């Protein structure tokens, strides 16, 4: 099994295998989405602790280490690393989109200066790496990221982050609609459960993006 045959939905079950990816360094950027302090804090409630334990284990043992390694690979190759994080401009969150104001788990109030909204220390931006703040699920919809990527002549966007079935999915679809070539690194992403993660990658793959592992990705990067 490999990226050419993994994560096939009903629609692409019998489709031909895609060509090998060619990701030119000057036209390719890594976008790390929403790996923020608030999501790495274990819940206080014992029941929620048990529910979220697999997610936290995946994040700490797989996603964060793999993303850190991939970030370093991009930096070593003089390639751009960008970040998107959920962070509102108003302390009361008045500027948030409706999806972040609705009651329930997805209710998010993360003022941009709060510790909870910061990117985790292991993945901290360096030097002049670009960080956009969003109050939407999509990293494109509520920011100037689209313009920034075009100005930098970026054609290929490699995605890492959380949550696969929410902000990753929304960002991937927005990028694809803007005709960016999108690659999602499956072992640098996570959802609330592995079931949600795998199913969303199956939905996205082949039409909105290509899904690869971090190990598979590196040989596709060319001068």
Image: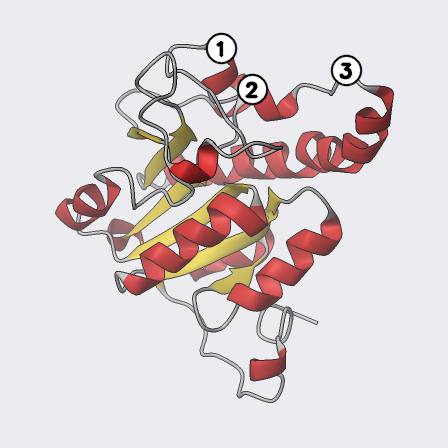
The structure residue drawn at horizontal position 65% and vertical position 52%, both measured from the top left corner, is: 197
Count residues near mark 2 (Cα–Cα under 10 Å), then give few for <14, some for 14-19, many for 20+. some
Does residue 34 lie above or below 91 as drawn?
A: below
Distance of label 2 from label 1 (alpha carbons) = 7 Å
Say whether residue 103 is visible.
yes
- State the image coordinates of residue 38 (x, y, percent, origin top left): 57, 20
The structure residue drawn at horizontal position 37% and vertical position 11%, both measured from the top left corner, is: 91
In contact (CB < 8 Å): disc 2 and disc 3: no
Count residues near mark 1 (Cα–Cα under 10 Å), then give few for <14, some for 14-19, many for 20+. few
Q: Which residue is mark 2?
A: 37
Q: Is residue 107 left or right of residue 53?
A: left
- State the image coordinates of residue 148 (x, y, percent, origin top left): 19, 41
Q: Which residue is mark 3?
A: 44
Secondary structure under the numbered disc 3 in the rendered image: loop
The structure residue drawn at horizontal position 62% and vertical position 33%, both measured from the top left corner, is: 105
Q: Quadrant of the N terminus?
A: bottom right
Say whether residue 222 is visible.
no
Distance of label 2 from label 3 (alpha carbons) = 15 Å
Secondary structure under the numbered disc 1 in the rendered image: helix
- State the image coordinates of residue 29 (x, y, percent, origin top left): 33, 46
Q: Which mark is residue 115?
A: 1
The tag earlier along the polypeptide, 2 or 1, is 2
In contact (CB < 8 Å): disc 2 and disc 1: yes
The tag earlier along the polypeptide, 2 or 3, is 2
- State the image coordinates of residue 180 (x, y, percent, origin top left): 29, 60
Count the labels in the image: 3
Q: Quadrant of the C terminus?
A: bottom left
Does residue 149 lie above or below 207 as drawn?
A: above
């Amino acid at each position: 099994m490999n990226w050419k045959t993994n994560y096939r939905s009903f629609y692409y079950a019998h489709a031909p295998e895609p060509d090998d990816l060619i990701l030119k360094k000057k036209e390719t950027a890594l976008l790390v989405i929403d790996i923020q302090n608030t999501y790495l804090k274990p819940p206080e409630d014992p029941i929620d602790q048990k529910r979220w334990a697999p997610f936290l284990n995946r994040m700490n043992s797989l996603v964060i280490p793999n993303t850190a390694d991939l970030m370093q690979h991009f930096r070593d190759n003089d390639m751009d690393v960008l970040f998107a994080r959920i962070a509102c401009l108003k302390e009361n969150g008045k500027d948030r989109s409706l999806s972040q104001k609705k009651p329930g788990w997805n209710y998010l109030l993360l003022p941009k200066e709060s510790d909870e909204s910061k990117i985790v220390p292991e993945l901290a931006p360096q030097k002049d790496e670009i960080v956009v703040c969003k109050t939407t699920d999509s990293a494109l919809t509520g920011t100037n990221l689209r313009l920034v990527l075009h100005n930098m002549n970026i054609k290929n966007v490699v995605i890492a982050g959380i949550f696969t079935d929410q902000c990753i999915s929304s960002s991937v679809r927005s990028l694809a609609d803007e005709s960016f070539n999108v690659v999602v690194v499956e072992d640098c992403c996570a959802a609330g459960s592995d079931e949600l993660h795998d199913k969303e990658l199956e939905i996205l793959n082949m039409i909105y993006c290509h899904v690869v592992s971090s190990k598979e990705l590196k040989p596709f990067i060319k001068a």
